[in-house]
């Protein structure tokens, strides 16, 4: 592993910033390149075939920029991880989300809100099934919440009604199974951006953010492979977007991300 190569991150838009933020805080001596494919957001409404082509193209793009490892900071892409070809280690935010689930619960039901594609692909259920049969996800897909957040959240009323539409069916399905849902996994990297609003609406729910588990997975891998950046030079974060420059600028400042350069870019092979 090229120790001073940057860590690449991929998302459809600004959602992966929630993962980047966590990484910058916990692994500050690393360089980062973030690729946000805003032009084609929302990924959650796209077909798998197209998502696989997009994911592979972005992975190739980042490999060309010398990354030492790639984090799929997007649950939708992570639900298709076995379909991607990569020369460097690939990390899935879904694997991290399952680890986080197991660290707060041993059995019972856990609510999961995610994009339509993530829910359809059953990435969480597959990953969880490898480790336990004692926990069951009650999953609800949302067509719109990720996009509302990506577009700057707009009217609070609209945001809240989108959150309600995603969360209420989960609570109801819990009740039908005779259980009260206590944990809600935020299965789209856009959702932690509005965790404060979700918490105010549902103070009884414990929110699970996969980003925390992701840092742990990555840290372990870098440790095992002697992959930490040994450099003492200034550490650099480069952010690339295929659209929505202003939304990126605003969110970088709202989340107080370290960002040395923000650039518009194109994805080879896509209009
Ligand atoms: N942030 C992404 C995820 O975690 C995708 C949102 C979207 O583009 O639909 O799934």
Image (tube, rainbow, N blue to C red):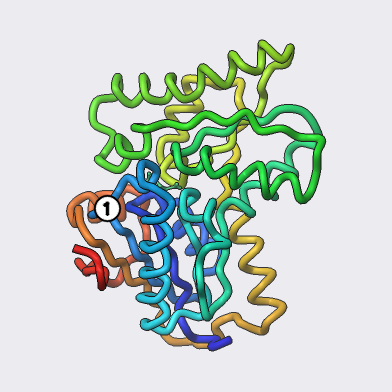
When the figure is inspected, residue 133 is found, relative to residue 75, above or below; the finding is above
When the figure is inspected, residue 10 is found, relative to residue 154, above or below; the finding is below
When the figure is inspected, residue 84 is found, relative to residue 97, above or below; the finding is below
The image shows residue 7 at horizontal and vertical percentages of 48, 73
How many labels sit on residues?
1
The image shows residue 45 at horizontal and vertical percentages of 36, 41
Taking the spot 45% from the left edge, 79% from the top edge, the residue there is: 67
Taking the spot 59% from the left edge, 80% from the top edge, the residue there is: 228
On screen, residue 59 versus residue 135, left or right, reads left
Taking the spot 52% from the left edge, 75% from the top edge, the residue there is: 69
Q: Depth check: give the residue in front, 147 or 270.
A: 270
Q: Which residue is mark 1?
A: 40
When the figure is inspected, residue 93 is found, relative to residue 59, above or below; the finding is above
Q: Quadrant of residue 162?
A: top left
Provide the secondary structure element on which disc 1 rests.
helix
Q: Quadrant of the N terminus?
A: bottom right
On screen, residue 167 versus residue 66, left or right, reads right
The image shows residue 14 at horizontal and vertical percentages of 34, 51
Q: Quadrant of residue 136?
A: top right
Q: Residues within 10 Å of mark 1 (few under 14, many from 20)?
A: some
On screen, residue 252 versus residue 215, left or right, reads left
- Check mark 1 vs ligand 1: CB closer than 8 Å? yes or no: no
The image shows residue 212 at horizontal and vertical percentages of 59, 52
Taking the spot 61% from the left edge, 67% from the top edge, the residue there is: 218
Q: Quadrant of the C terminus?
A: bottom left
On screen, residue 242 versus residue 7, left or right, reads left
Q: Depth check: give the residue in front, 260 or 39.
A: 39
């Amino acid at each position: 592993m090229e120790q001073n190569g940057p860590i690449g991150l991929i998302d459809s838009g600004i959602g992966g910033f929630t993962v980047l933020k966590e990484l910058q805080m916990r692994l500050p001596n690393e360089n980062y390149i973030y690729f946000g494919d805003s032009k084609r957001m929302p990924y959650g409404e796209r077909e798998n075939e197209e998502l696989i082509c997009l994911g592979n193209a972005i992975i190739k793009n980042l490999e060309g920029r010398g990354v030492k490892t790639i984090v799929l900071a997007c649950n939708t892409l992570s639900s298709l991880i076995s379909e991607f070809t990569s020369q460097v280690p690939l990390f899935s935010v879904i694997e991290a989300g399952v680890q986080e689930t197991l660290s707060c619960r041993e059995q019972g039901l856990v609510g999961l809100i995610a994009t339509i594609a993530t829910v359809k692909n059953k990435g969480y259920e597959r990953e969880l099934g490898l480790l336990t049969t004692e926990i069951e996800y009650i999953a609800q897909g949302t067509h719109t919440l990720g996009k509302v957040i990506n577009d700057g959240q707009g009217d609070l009323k609209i945001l809240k009604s989108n959150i309600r539409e995603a969360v209420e069916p989960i609570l109801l399905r819990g009740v039908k199974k005779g259980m009260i849902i206590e944990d809600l996994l935020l299965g789209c990297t856009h959702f932690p951006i509005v965790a404060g609003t979700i918490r105010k609406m549902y103070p009884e729910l414990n929110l699970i953010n996969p980003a925390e588990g992701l840092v742990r997975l990555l840290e372990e891998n870098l440790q095992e492979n002697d992959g930490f950046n040994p450099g003492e030079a200034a550490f650099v974060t480069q952010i690339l977007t295929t659209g929505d420059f202003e939304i990126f600028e605003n969110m970088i400042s709202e989340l107080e991300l370290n960002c040395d350069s923000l650039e518009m870019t194109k994805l080879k092979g896509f209009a």
